Amino acid sequence: MPQSEITTLEQFIVDQQALHAQADGSLSRVFRAIELAAKIVNRDVRKAGLIDILGQDGSVNTHGEDQQKLDVLANNIFISALSRTGEVSMIISEENEGVVYVEGCDHEKYIVAIDPLDGSSNIDVNVSIGSIFSIYKRQNAEQSPNLQECLQTGNEQVAAGYVFYGSSTMLVYTTGQGVNGFTLDDALQEFCLSHPNIQTPSNGKIFSVNEGNYNDFSEGVKSYIDYCKSNEAGPYKARYIGSMIADFHLNLLKGGVFVDPGTTGSPSGKLRLMYECNPMAFLAEQAGGKATYGEGSIMELQPKELHQRCPLFIGSANMVDLAMHYISEEDTAIINR
Ligand code: AHM
Ligand code: MG
């Protein structure tokens, strides 16, 4: 691409804002904060082996998991950048038990949900990881900010996306008008539009699931996995990186299905509705794919608590539909119990 034709994320945001007469620039400021945080986290991820930020920092997050140093760092970086926009009243994070109320911003209009570093068990072994964000508008910014206002369905998302620290660093996002991907140019330190208007194939050949949990899956999920490995399916290629963003990104571009179902030990699966499932569902649907918890659209689920978990079947539309043929009522009863 000729250098003069590069579209930076910054330019793209300005252009998008100009398309909406009522836009006051507040969402653009939130995006700029996410872009800045992404660059800082990217810088730290890239030198993680060189400075003392690998390993566990000794604290435990709200899910009882060891927090890695980079998790804590990334969480602080995103919260600090978002807090300084002056546009965000509340931040909810996979790494914080409660709502982070931004000082002096009681009546600002946005709520941002973040998984600051997804795939954290892969940090120490140099496997791709990412950050996920999801932006909501407050229903009533006149009132004092409160937890209840954060519990919105995925359908209320104003924007969502992820930053993927892979062989290159990408920022992929949607505001409900398609999905666009930007690759970080290291020399310029700018995210440049590299994947405009991403459309996911309606069929694919990849299935992504942690098969180590096979014995704990429902009968329907087991029979779907058996199908994926059968000659009838092709068989599909198995790909499971263990960082949802990396698995999702692969399937988004190539066509495939990612499954994180309920297990006997964890009937609602592993992933969190507000930090992981909803933003990915918004992106998948905007790219022409689908996302369901087994019965209906992920984004219709009414969250009851911040850290709620949720089974996830996401990816190419026809593959998700087919997976649902294997999920019986009995299975969804197990999944939803
Ligand atoms: P994290 O947010 O604590 O990193 O956990 C979520 C990750 C997902 O990225 C990934 O899909 C899943 O955990 C992998 O879990 P498992 O190794 O149990 O299959
Ligand atoms: Mg995560």
Image (tube, helix red, strand yellow):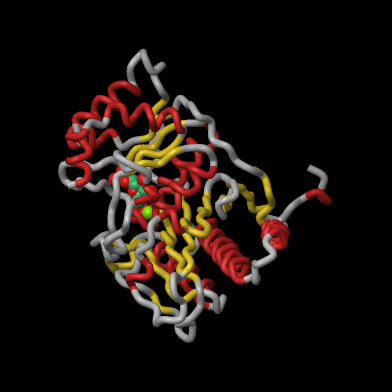
Q: Residue at x 50, y 55 (%)?
A: 160
Q: Residue 255: x percent and y percent? A: 50, 31
Q: Residue 114: x percent and y percent? A: 43, 62
Q: Where in the image, quadrant-wise, is ligand 2 located?
A: bottom left
Say whether residue 330 is left or right of residue 274. left
Q: Residue at x 59, y 62 (%)?
A: 35
Q: Residue 294: x percent and y percent? A: 30, 39
Identify which residue, 220 or 208, lies in the foreground.
Answer: 220
Say whether residue 294 is left or right of residue 22. left
Q: Residue at x 36, y 39 (%)?
A: 313
Furthest residue toward top: 231
Taking the image as drawn, is residue 121 in sight? no
Viewport quadrant of the N terminus:
top right
Say whether residue 156 is left or right of residue 14. left
Furthest residue toward bottom: 104
Q: Residue 243: x percent and y percent? A: 40, 46
Q: Residue at x 36, y 13 (%)?
A: 231
